[in-house]
Image: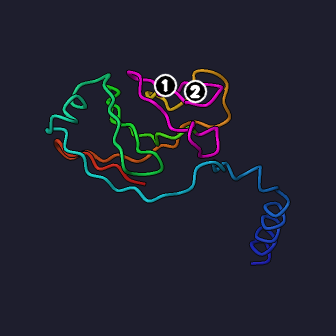
Amino acid sequence: MKKLFTVIIGAAFTLSACSKDEWDTRNPYLPEIAVNVPINTALPTYNKLQYPGNAVYVAGYGINGFFVINTGTGIRAFEATCANHAINGCSKLTLNGVEATCGCSDALIYNLYLGLATTEAQYPLKEYRVMQSGTILNVYN
């Protein structure tokens, strides 16, 4: 029992010695906004998600909407807001095939297969969870 107490106290001191920046990798630019959206891929608007290599933009949810892509190995969804800028008029991303482009002066381009910028950037795109049941996708966080 004495050993367990010593281990717990040691762990508490170790964790308290870490700065917040060492363990908190939350993106400071993008707030948490609840998303829970069903998408029916049988509908013409979303039909191309049934085929690999296709992406669509879904407006009206999250911060600036979100992108959904069929990667061929699964479905992924990403917030349509640049992860490396404060939210403003230029931070909304534009869909270009399987890439998303930031409207700000640095014009960051993100690959939707990975959610990563094609050039050096601090944060990847904010990803949402996707659950698939037949032709229905549920995008949520």
Circles 1 and 2, Cβ within 8 Å, touching? The answer is: yes
Image location of residue 18, percent across then percent down: 82, 56
Q: Which quadrant of the view contains residue 123?
A: top right
Q: Is residue 115 left or right of residue 5?
A: left
Q: Quadrant of the C terminus?
A: bottom left
Secondary structure predominantly adopted by residues drawn in magenta: loop
Mark 2 = which residue? 117
Q: Residue at x 36, y 50 (%)?
A: 60
Label 1 SS? strand
Identify the amino acid type marked 1: Asn
In the picture, the disc for residue 49 is none
Query: Which residues are the magenta region?
Result: 83-110
Q: Is residue 5 magenta?
A: no
In the picture, the disc for residue 111 is 1
- The Cα atoms of the two marked residues, 1 and 2, are separated by 6 Å
Please tell me which residue lies in front, 29 or 15.
29
Q: Is residue 2 left or right of residue 76?
A: right
